[in-house]
Image (cartoon, rainbow, N blue to C red):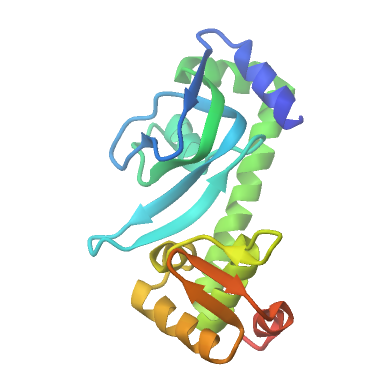
Amino acid sequence: MSAEALVDATARAAGAVAFKAAAGDVLFRPDEPCRGFIALRSGSIRVGLTGASGREVVLYRVRPGEVCLQTFSCLVEGWLYAAEGVVETNVEAVLIPPVAFERMMAEDAGFRSAVLGSVAARFGDFQQVVQTLAFTGLEARVAAVLLRLADDAGAVRATHEALAAEIGSAREAVSRQLGLMARDGLVALSRGRIDILRTSALKRLCDGPL
């Protein structure tokens, strides 16, 4: 089922409500109950955890056609949210109440297959996060996130703190690593922006031994 088909199927459910949310809006927080199943028509949601120290780790993003694993767990198991969901780019979506979600999972084979397929992909994302944190050095992780977030001009518009959240590290450690990369001519640093100067060298860092 395509992203559009998933939204259309969700919109036909009893109690479906279309809504919009702007970048920066918080859709859910830890210890809050789940309001229902969300199907995105456009935009993205960043899901992350924040520790007692205030350090954030980005777990995954939800985009059209994808299912939030936190929401799925809350709906299926009756749990409260354990993470925070923040709108990253303006969202248009459809929300259905828990009882409608349960009915669709039981009666609509296409909807059920799409949801479960997305959930399986989410577990793959988690496995990648764990492998990266456990086995990949900081230099390679910083290089990888720079390449992933760079625009077509090779610019990364993100703070050091935001980059640290992406790779599960401390801001100070990321700043030190970026400083070393700048010293070696791989990147150029400015306020809120990092320009990649040697893409091939960053790729070699990512492909190096773990």
**Side (left or right) of 72 relative to 52:** right
Q: Is residue 104 above or below residue 163?
A: above
Q: Quadrant of the N terminus?
A: top right
Residue 133 screen position, x and y as percent: 50, 73
Of 145 and 58, the residue lying toward us: 145
Horizontally, is 199 left or right of 95 in the view?
right
Against 159, residue 134 (above or below) is: below
- The image shows residue 1, relative to residue 84, as above or below, that is above
Residue displayed at 66% across by 67% down: 154
Front residue of 166/68: it is 166
Q: Is residue 40 left or right of residue 80?
A: right
In terms of image quadrants, where is residue 66?
A: top right
Q: Residue at x 66, y 80 (%)?
A: 202
Q: Looking at this rendering, what residue extends furthest in the top direction?
A: 14
Please tell me which residue lies in front, 151 or 29.
Answer: 151
For the image shown, how many numbered marks are present on the structure? Answer: 0
Q: Toward the viewer: 18 or 16?
A: 18
Residue 65's image quarter? top right
Extreme residue toward the bottom, this view:
184
Locate the C terminus and report the quarter of the image it occupies. Answer: bottom right
| Image location (x, y in percent) of residue 98 | 46, 20
Task: Give the residue displayed 31% in from the left and 63% down from the top.
Answer: 55
Which picture quadrant has residue 172?
Answer: bottom left
Image height of 95 relative to 58, above or below: above
Question: How far from the left and from the top, in percent, is residue 93?
Answer: 56, 25
Q: Residue furthest left?
A: 52
Give the farthest residue toward the front. 190
Where residue 204 sits in the image (x, y, percent)?
Answer: 71, 84
Residue that appears at 53% across and 12% down: 16
